[in-house]
Amino acid sequence: MSAQTALMQQKAGRPGPDLNTQALHMDARRESLRLLALLSPSLLLVFAIIIVPIGWLFWLSLFDEAGALSAANYARFFEQASYIKTFITTFKVAFIVTGACVLLGYPLAYMLSQLPRRAASICLIFVILPFWTSVLVRTYAWLVILQRKGLINSWLIDLGVISQPLSLANNFSGVVIGMTHILLPFLVLPLYASMKTIDTDCLRAGMNLGAGPAATFRQIFFPLSLPGLASGVVIVFVLCLGFFVTPALMGGGKVIMWAMRMEQTTSLYSNWGAGAALGVVLLVVTLALLGLFQWLLGARATGVWSSR
Amino acid sequence: MSEDFGLPISHRQRLWLYCLGGLVLLFLIAPSIIIVIMSFSDSTLLQFPPQQWSLRWYQAYFGSLEWRDATIVSVKVAVMTVLVATPLGTAAAYAINRGTLRFNGTINALLTASLIVPVILIGIGTFFLYARIGLNNTLTGLVIAHTVQALPLVALTVLSGLRSYDMNQERVARSLGAGRVAAFWQVTMPQIRFSIVSGALFAFITSFDEVVVSLFISGGETTTLTRRMFNALRDQIDPTIAAISTCLIVLSVVLLSVAQIFGRRH
């Protein structure tokens, strides 16, 4: 009888006093509150440690040294030659390192994707182990290898190839070599993962239809691997822009990159407004690049593992 | 069907590819191997291969009070980070896995923020915040900052474990009268414990190897190993660092192997 009334009321377009629906609603709501409670400690921590300070720094960047609202901190970037030089250096390093990572990483990922499973997983260890080794350890290793009295120079002199040591560390080339080594796994791992999903049947079909190995690669495999390559390139490029440790240790004070500039402005000169402005622009550029990539490929760019 | 040898291209035709790939692998692994070998050298000069072997750089490392204190600080911070980040990350992954919450996109973006925001900005921001609330140069401050860095790794690792687990099993347990906590603890937890352990190991390495944020917020009594190494490298290249680096490499190998073994048993 009551069920009939409810049905009639529903048909009439009025929400009936359906106790069951209401109870379910309450239950669902309580459930999401519980889930939110599980999430809240993590979200609070992230909010307090990342969002609040960045917002605060952004606020600071809007005021000049006298405390008046102004765009002076941002105008500086276009006016002072030293800032312009920093940006040019940063982008130059980022382009060269990303290019080197593509040149080295693509053949490696391709080989890994073609190897039998067992061999591939053994080779992968050589990619993952450096990935999880401290950036400091790897930078130190390159300092040892590349410096004036380092391994490369002493070997080359012993072999009689050169008489004067080459300057490989403490300059631009040292920074590029060290950063390429550190960032290479960030390109290889996503590229390898996407290459593994390419259907071998497509390649087999191409070869069946008369394409040689080179044509199959160029016309089928390479286009299919482009999304994976693009995500690796974006990750490496973005990490380059904010990279600190290697340029600070291997640049010899001559290669000033964006992150070093931020550290100097805040720690050395205590100019928080200028440092904050640099950080805000860096964040905006990073997010813009990731957003552009996501928009172009519709892929998820959040696979950026720890950006140390 | 053999998926491995699907293409009619012989290994010989691929020889150039194997050579090229092998060289890149060598480029990746050689620096670590060189450091490990050099750490056993007897010379203060950087010779490779070393003429004479000794453990003097390890003695220098373990004998130095400064290095020992820094190592103890790093271990303490890493252990506490694991203890905080693992439960928090697991809880977050559990909630995200349900996928019933509104603002799921926002929640994901917030949780993975520390992977996307440039780490130098996090370092400066954290230093700035800590200066106001007096957390610079404290263990608590370091643990909080490292927890934020480790959270997304734990959450993503546990989430991938939960994705291959059928949540209906927990519902069955609850319908049979188990409470929420009991159902999670006795049914879900044993099946995702390998992902939780992997997540905890990643949290440990993340904290132990973290450089940039520690550079800003640690100092004095709470100088971490990485901060001391960074400063030492700025001054000169002391072979003691080769010994410390070797210890760090061994630590990474051990933790990764444990994660791998746990993953396989899963």
Image (cartoon, coloured by chain):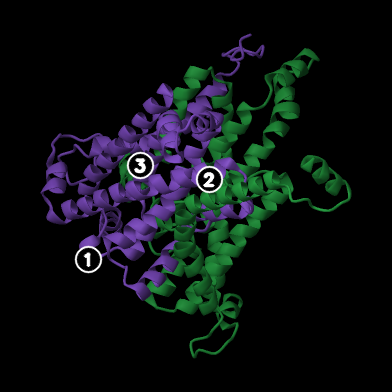
Chain colours: A green, B purple
In this rendering, which labeled residue sits more in front, label 2 or label 3?
2
A5 on left or right of B66: right
Letter of the chain that mark 3 sits on in the rendering = A
Provide the secondary structure element on which disc 1 rests. helix
Confirm whether circles 1 and 3 share one chain.
no
The foreground one among A144 and A208 is A208
Image point (63%, 54%), residue name: B103
Confirm whether circles 2 and 3 share one chain.
no
Image point (54%, 32%), residue name: B171
Q: Residues within 10 Å of mark 2 (few under 14, many from 20)?
A: many
In the picture, residue B8 is in which quadrant? top right
Residue A99 visible within the image: yes
Task: Residue B32 in the image: state x and y as whole percent.
Answer: 34, 37
User: From mark 1 to mark 2, how far is it between C-alphas?
Assistant: 39 Å
Residue at the disc numbered 1: B220
Provide the secondary structure element on which disc 3 rests. helix
Q: Earlier in the sequence, mark 1 or mark 2?
A: 2
Residue at the disc numbered 2: B95
Which quarter of the figure is the C terminus of chain B placed in?
Answer: top left
Task: Residue A203 in the image: state x and y as whole percent.
Answer: 72, 20
Residue at the disc numbered 3: A152
User: From mark 1 to mark 3, how far is it between C-alphas?
Assistant: 37 Å
Residue B48 visible within the image: no
A168 on left or right of B245: right
Letter of the chain that mark 2 sits on in the rendering = B
B207 on left or right of A195: left
Image point (34%, 46%), residue name: B82
